[in-house]
Amino acid sequence: MKLLDALGPNPRAVRMFLREKQLDLPCEQIDILGAANRRPPFSEFNPGGQLPALLLDDGSCIAETVAICEYLEDLHPAPPLIGSTPREKAETRMWQRRVELNITENLYNAFRYSVGLEMFRERMTCLPEAAPGLARIVQEKLAWLDGLMGRRSWICGERFTLADIILFCALDFGEGAGQPIDPGLINVNAWFARVVTRDSAHDSRHPEGVASGQRGV
């Protein structure tokens, strides 16, 4: 089993998940800036072109960040980052979907359509006119989440989960891509400050990102 890895917040989320699990997988770096993920041999493993991807021993490939993490959780259930019971798993998946649909996908598309436009305009349909509205939705939904966090330590209460990892990696990326967290969101900022002190938050940074000073990758 080998992780096909790269710069970027989604690959970082899997690296952070692995650090929390204390798992060490062999990695192959894919040049995402040079679009190596959009052509063979990578596209033969993952025609969707996304990173990260998990190449299994039989030659098959699992793509999509959440699918990779769920596969690894099934293989290595401790410590649980999705859940130990059906209820915990359902709760984590509920919040993971809310985080992705409301916040992270809007944040990433706002980036692709604005700051990242030159990189993405030839790779996907880009709508530059949509970027300001998407960024505004991100802030509105963060304010919604801020009101729900209350005294929770983590998104799912007192359990640190995949939902926290996905949101943290997106927001840390956003801090360096023109989409900072509103300082008035007291609960979200306090949550972010707790996550950033975890060893996995530090150890999951990509060496190229560290060298260049780029956040969130």
Image (spheres, helix red, strand yellow):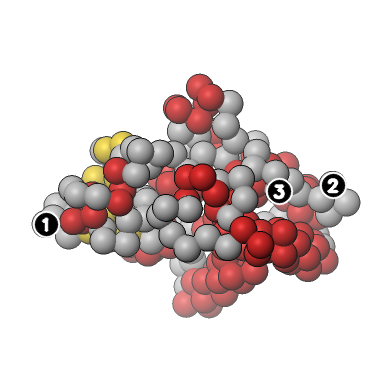
Look at mark 1 in the image and give the residue it sits on: 58
- Classify residue 195 by image quadrant: top right
Look at mark 3 in the image and give the residue it sits on: 179
Residue 152 vertical placement versus 208 (above, below): below
Mark 1: few/some/many CA within 10 Å (<14, 14-19, 20+): few
User: Mark 3 or mark 1, which has the lower sequence index?
Assistant: 1
Q: Is residue 57 left or right of residue 77?
A: left
Look at mark 2 in the image and give the residue it sits on: 183
Q: Nearer the viewer, mark 2 or mark 1?
A: 2
What kind of element bears circle 3?
loop
What's the residue at 55%, 53% (across, down)?
112
Q: Is residue 127 visible?
A: yes
Q: Is residue 101 left or right of residue 148?
A: left
Residue closer to the observer: 150 or 106? 106
What's the residue at 58%, 26% (across, down)?
213
User: Mark 2 or mark 1, which has the lower sequence index?
Assistant: 1
Residue 134 position, x and y percent, is 68, 63
Three-letter amino acid code of the residue under disc 3: Gln
Tell me the tag on residue 132. Answer: none
Residue lying farthest top? Answer: 211
